[in-house]
Image (cartoon, coloured by chain):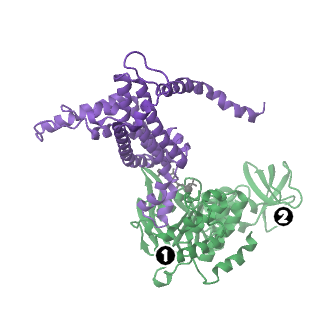
Amino acid sequence: MSVEARERRQPWILLSPALGAVALLLLVPLIFIVVYSFWLRAAVGPDTPGFHLDNWQRALTDPFYRYILLNTLKIAAITTVFCALLGYPAAYFITRSRGNKLILLLLLMLPFWISYIIRTMSWINILGSSGAVNTLLLSMGVISDPIRMLYNEATVILGLVHFLLPFMVLNIYVSLDGIDTNLEDAATSLGATRWQAFLQVTLPLSLPGLAAGGLLCFVLGAGTYITPLILGGPRDAMFANLVFEAIITQLNWPMGSALSLLLLLVLGALVAIYNRFLGMSQLTKGLG
Amino acid sequence: MVGNLQPCAARVLSPCPRPLGRGAIAQRGTPVSSVQLNDIVKRFGSFVAVDKTSLTIPEGAFVTLLGPSGCGKTTTLRMIAGLLDPTEGEIVIGGRRVNDVPIHKRNLGLVFQNYALFPHKTVVENVAFGLRYRKVPRDEISRRVKMALELVQLPQVGGRYPKALSGGQQQRIALARAIVIEPDVLLLDEPLSALDANLREDMRVELKRIQERIGVTTVFVTHDQSEALAMSDRIVVMSNGKVEQVGAPADVYNTPASEFVARFLGASNILDGRCLSRGAEGALLEVPVFGKVMVPSAKAPHLGGAGPAKLVIRAERLVLRDTAPDGGLMSAPATIDAVDYQGQAARYFLRAGDHSLQAINMIDERPFPAGADVHMTLRPQDCAALPG
Ligand SMILES: Nc1ncnc2c1ncn2[C@@H]1O[C@H](COP(=O)(O)OP(=O)(O)OP(=O)(O)O)[C@@H](O)[C@H]1O
Ligand SMILES: [Mg+2]
């Protein structure tokens, strides 16, 4: 066998265990969910198999579901914008810091060592009625009663930004790190101020990283149900909470299946649009 | 390639004699583009990268900073450019102290080793970049960009992105981008070192032609001595953050001011000896191998009087012969240890007593074989003397 032929076969041999696992653990359950979404929930007894479009019709037409879907996309979008605004300067700073780059990157990864749920719950200790902020303000006499800060849309967004910011910073960092610093120097030598050089050269060249980070934050943000569960009020449910409700609380697996597939399709469409304009390779670069 | 430079250049330059030259020169008393470094020091933490360097670069000159890796060439250049602030000392460009002038107001052309072209902009957009910050009208921009591209002989690539250009073409575009703004000073940091050997020599000729054509004051950084010798009006030899010698290429080559310069430029033999006397006609040195040597004054400018001294003999001035010469020449017997055959020349590694020497000679027919006994001959005026 020629080296070339072997090199062509080798990736598939190395990939096969992972592909097998993905097929078994993701694809097969997904097929179950697709099938389930066309079943009907019976009032008593097991669900009715068959090809019924009732769940899908409800998922697509019910104004409540539509409202929650739009609200979910809105929260994910706001979160993404905040992550970008906070993450870009941080990534830029890490890229330009000379000696301690590795330490800063390590610090950025540190939150991943703690469970996401615990990190989210920590906000209760900070913002809750007997949390750190209220205790401090009370003891200083600034307020006489605890302020209610938790359980609203703002805290959901806060929790999501807290969770997703490192993904954004890492993606932008990877992009910025690949840009030759001589380019900005060249631009300033030609008469641009530092800020103009940044806008003209560094920012456009880092847009792929920003877009990749944005996509990641948006998709992860739109798919979450833990953050609104812990930090949101009753009216701050996101779409994944509906799926959770349907499947865990109401035991309505067919409806839950249809809803989860709907979310999957919406986010899938966004990824497809991204891929059409920027390509998937940038995303994998940011993750690696 | 070199042959067709002239007609093209003449065509570009015919409408006005210095289309890319600087307009402001005549209006000021001091030349706007001379560069002066006064006791410049640059420290990174406790590390001294540039140490008390003073330098005057006259207007229109092509000055090369030459030295081994890490000697502070780039650091010096970046301080002139305004990319680094000197820890101490003063930088004066055109009679004006510029220490506190930010880089974008210094009007300098900068060319990097790795070209640093903007990858997301076309060649035309790259070259036009600096003009957009100078309030140049649109049609004037396109006229000047076109002229700059013709000057670097790449008028046809304007619409391409840098990625679609070869290394040599990218470097020409980088040069065009730097000169189109009519900089007061052109700063080049090893601009040719990323190119392969043949292209490097072509670019060397062309860079020098363009510089002479527009007459811009140029500071060129390299660690390649042949580049420095071929292109410069003046060479500044640096070592460990200090200037070792400043002079015309021939002066630096023939009359090195220190052992470092002698060893760094070309192959030299350095013999430790004594200066017996220093008179008007020269310095009388006594060295091993050759005995007494009378070095002319011009070749011993740094030697004060009697005392320890060194004799510097360029390897190509040490001529090997079968037989001892008849007079006028100094000579000493030696044995050839090894021969490095280089085609039209050969490099000989010689042994004379306990001393090892090198000679590089042109070859008439075939080189002397290794192991041969020969006579090394030398004219006294081809030596240089240094304080010991
Ligand atoms: N930002 C910095 N921080 C610390 N040390 C530095 C910094 N920049 C340069 N140096 C040190 O200063 C010295 C001079 O560096 P410089 O880049 O000027 O050398 P150079 O002569 O241009 O060498 P080369 O031919 O390799 O480019 C080197 O020893 C380098 O390690
Ligand atoms: Mg350098």
Name the residue located 44 percent from the left edge and 33 percent from the top edge: A56
Toward which corner of the image does residue B364 lie, by quadrant?
A: bottom right
Q: Quadrant of the C terminus of chain B?
A: bottom right
**Can residue B304 be seen in the rendering of this structure?**
no
Q: Quadrant of the N terminus of chain B?
A: bottom right
A5 up-or-down from B199: above or below? above
Q: Residue at x 50, y 46 (%)?
A: A274
Mark 1 residue element: loop
Tell me the green chain.
B
- Looking at this view, name the residue that lies furthest to the top: A45
Give the side of residue B249 with respect to residue B22, left or right: right
Chain of the residue displaying label 2: B
Q: Find numbered disc 2 in the image and state the secondary structure of the residue it sits on.
A: loop
Answer above or below: position of B158 versus B69.
Answer: below
Q: Is mark 1 within 8 Å of ligand 2?
A: no
Q: Colour of chain A?
A: purple
Mark sitting on residue B279: none
Q: Residue B325 has which mark?
A: 2
In the rendered image, which residue does mark 1 sit on? B136
Q: Looking at the image, is B117 positioned above or below residue A143?
A: below
Residue A62 location in percent, x, y?
A: 36, 36
